[in-house]
Image (cartoon, helix red, strand yellow):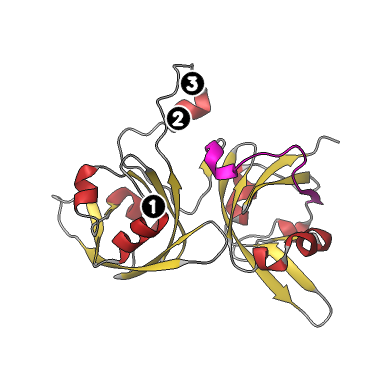
Amino acid sequence: MATTSNPPWLSSPRTQGIPKTFTEQCGFPKSTKAVLTTSMPGKEEWPIDLQFLDGPQWRHSAVTVGGGFSKFAADVGVVVGDLLVFEWVDEGYLVAKKYPRSPPPKPRSQSRAESSVTPTGSEGFAASSPHPVAPPASVAGPSTLNPPRFTKTLRKSHLLPRPQARIDIPTEFWRTHGQEQFDGPLWTISGPLWWGIAKSAVIVTPRQTFCMLTQGWWEFWMLNKFKLGDTLLFVKTGPAAFEVSVVVQ
């Protein structure tokens, strides 16, 4: 779900509508309680209350009530013109991402993939599936000359159906960059065709500790058309972001 903040919304910061199209796509919300979080490390969460709307006169299925949403907006520094993208990743949870307003781009020809996802209004929706083409540059963060990276060759265990789908982070990589980065934070993963958000998890056994990307990984590898035996290159492009590509053998 995407929305652009505007003066009427800022004059009533406690109310944010959930489009009916978003609800039809992913079933959110199912109750009057929900939680907003972000894709950045830190696991900060904002509880929000919701009120359901019923009737054809409403273009929203529910609206936020109380002060939860206004606290979120204040904490993340929302200003007029910012684009807010809310992605459903779990029952009762929405992941929020803010894209600051930027000057209008110079006219250019659109690719077929871009034209197929051009929004028709100020509101759209994004369910648990990743998004087509590449994310805005602000998702990936600043580039460096030699960003951290690792490769993984896809095995059957990486291509399991939901909810078992997961991929492990090499031990040397997570030990170098910190186990805590993969103990719950949400990661933006950008592929050749689609990008999305995946939840990280740490699994501890008597013999070994594993860091993994779990929820969101299945949709990502399916929509990017990765297959068994592919070797993937993961490049860390931000505090919680990977760019993923297939290594040509």
In this rendering, would 75 be left or right of 159? left
Q: Residue at x 75, y 69 (%)?
A: 210
Graded by Cα atoms within 10 Å as few (under 14), some (14 to 19) or many (20 or more), the crowding at tag 3 reads few
Residue 105 visible here = yes
Name the kind of residue labelled 3 in the image.
Answer: Gln
In this rendering, would 203 be left or right of 55? right
Asked whether residue 147 is drawn in magenta, I would say: yes
Q: Residue at x 19, y 54 (%)?
A: 12
Name the kind of residue labelled 1 in the image.
Answer: Gly
Asked whether residue 200 is drawn in magenta, I would say: no
N-term mark: 2 or 3: 3
Q: Is residue 147 above or below residue 216?
A: above
Name the kind of residue labelled 2 in the image.
Answer: Ser
Q: Quarter of the image containing the C terminus?
A: top right
Q: Gap in Å between the C-alphas at discs 2 and 3?
A: 10 Å
| Mark sitting on residue 116 | 2
Which secondary structure, mark 2?
Answer: loop
Q: Position of residue 114 (x, y in %)?
A: 49, 28
Q: Which residue is mark 3?
A: 110
Which secondary structure, mark 1?
Answer: loop
Q: Position of residue 219 (x, y in %)?
A: 58, 51
- Span highlighted in magenta in the image: 136-153
